[in-house]
Image: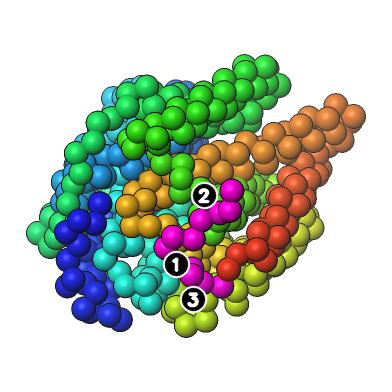
Amino acid sequence: MPAAIQDRPTAQAGKTPLVVRLLVLATFVVILNETLMINAIPRLMESMHVTEQAAQWVSTAFMLTMAAVIPVTGWFLQRVTTRQGYAIAMGVFIAGTALSAAAPTFTILLLGRIVQAAGTAVMMPLLMTTLMTVVPEQDRGRVMGNVTLAISVAPAMGPAISGLILQLGSWRLLFVAVLPVAGAVTYFGLRQLDNIGEPQVSTLDWASAAMATLGFGGLVYGLSLFGEGAAHLGPSIGIVVAGAATIAFFVIRQLKLQRTGAPLMDLRTLKHRTFALSLALMCIAFLAMMGSMILLPLYLQNLRGLTPLQTGLLLMPGGLAMGVLGPTVGRIYDRLGSRPLVLPGSIGIVLSLAGFTQISTTMPYWQVLALHALLMVSLAATFTPIFTLGMGALPPNMYPHGSSILGTLQQVAAAVGTALVVTVMSARTTSLVADGTATAAAQLSGMKLAFVIATVLAAGTIVVAALLPNRTTTSGEVMAH
């Protein structure tokens, strides 16, 4: 990959290279769309005459496409220049946004969301790979803090921003508002972007691409069905098992292809102990974050009677705090390493989720806001160091593969988190209602149990955080066989 890396960005130590700033902005715009539609479900059901389960697909299809496309991005990004990758990703995203805005039917809207997600899927690995290539090691934490802003704050801000836009009118405005922003970001990006490194010609193993798409896509799809009630339990378990089995075959094929030098997703990245540990911590933390992002709006809207806008505004300070702290956390990492951040961050995640197990119909809103802010700040303290530490543990030729694995597992973790909390909550609620408990009390009990499960899982982050090194020693550190 980095056959012709330029020296220019390195010469500007202490500054964020322009190429990275542009990619961060573009990534923020495209990732925002992953959660932008969550608040629009009631509007969509009304205007498109679809059920709630069908309407949820505008978010599920996005996540599903991301999980299916990201595995191929490692191969794709090695074949194209930075400018080509950027132009293709943003062009596809804009086409999907325009299609969604004008969609005459629900099927066309879903198709638009899938096209949008395919463009989004390329942006995050492109940003990560470019950053690792052009930013000197001593500045990576600070710059990765800005990246955390894009990939973590954008999904957190999605519901709040959509709540504001929906006050003005139709759900179509969500796409209409994104179009000019995406267009401007693409135009200025292409005027300013430099190519980083030389493309490498490599063949695509179509069997691997098909297995990755069916395996990761199937797994996310199966998990998304868990929330749709007992009737879907059989099919959803079957699809999850089939998806997992396909991923197992995919892994076997990659191990075989590694000997010939052309795997679609290079699993040798996982031999780097720090990368593997960072990946594990990121998955658990993302799972907890997505689980709480599903539960809190349900609690605030269904049980406390808040509007989508009020819910968005109550949860906005946490998202903003996460964004504001990202660069600061990065600077602390550059100076002191990961330990002073990741361990307290992991403990903060567990404490905030433990606080949410105490929700009630009378819990003061300031407590909800404070617990959510603690969760978001703790995630900010965790994500920036583990991304920097994990990617920094890899040799440069593995950056595209590392960012591809990171992005894929992030989507899978989000799907697992969502499926887990919705299934636990639904099962508990149904069981209590059958025993004669009032619906609201049963729902509250279901949500509490879901938060208990999320807290127990998040405790795993403390264990992994304790195993992580303070800094990456060398790019070549490999796990002992």
Q: What residue is disc 3 on?
A: 333
Q: Quadrant of residue 130?
A: bottom left
Question: Relative to 361, is 93 above or below?
Answer: above
Residue 362 drawn at (x, y percent):
77, 59
Q: CA distance from mark 1 to mark 3?
A: 17 Å
Going by the numbered disc 1, the residue's amino acid type is: Thr
Q: What residue is disc 2 on?
A: 271
Point out which mark residue 462 bears: none
Going by the numbered disc 3, the residue's amino acid type is: Tyr
Query: What residue is rendered at 52% in x and 81% in y?
Result: 336
| Residue stretch in magenta | 470-481
Q: What residue is disc 1 on?
A: 474
126 or 221: nearer the viewer? 126
Label 3 neighbour load within 10 Å: few <14, some 14-19, many 20+: many
Query: What residue is rendered at 56% in x and 73% in y?
Result: 470
Question: Relative to 455, is 38 above or below?
Answer: above
Q: Earlier in the sequence, mark 1 or mark 2?
A: 2
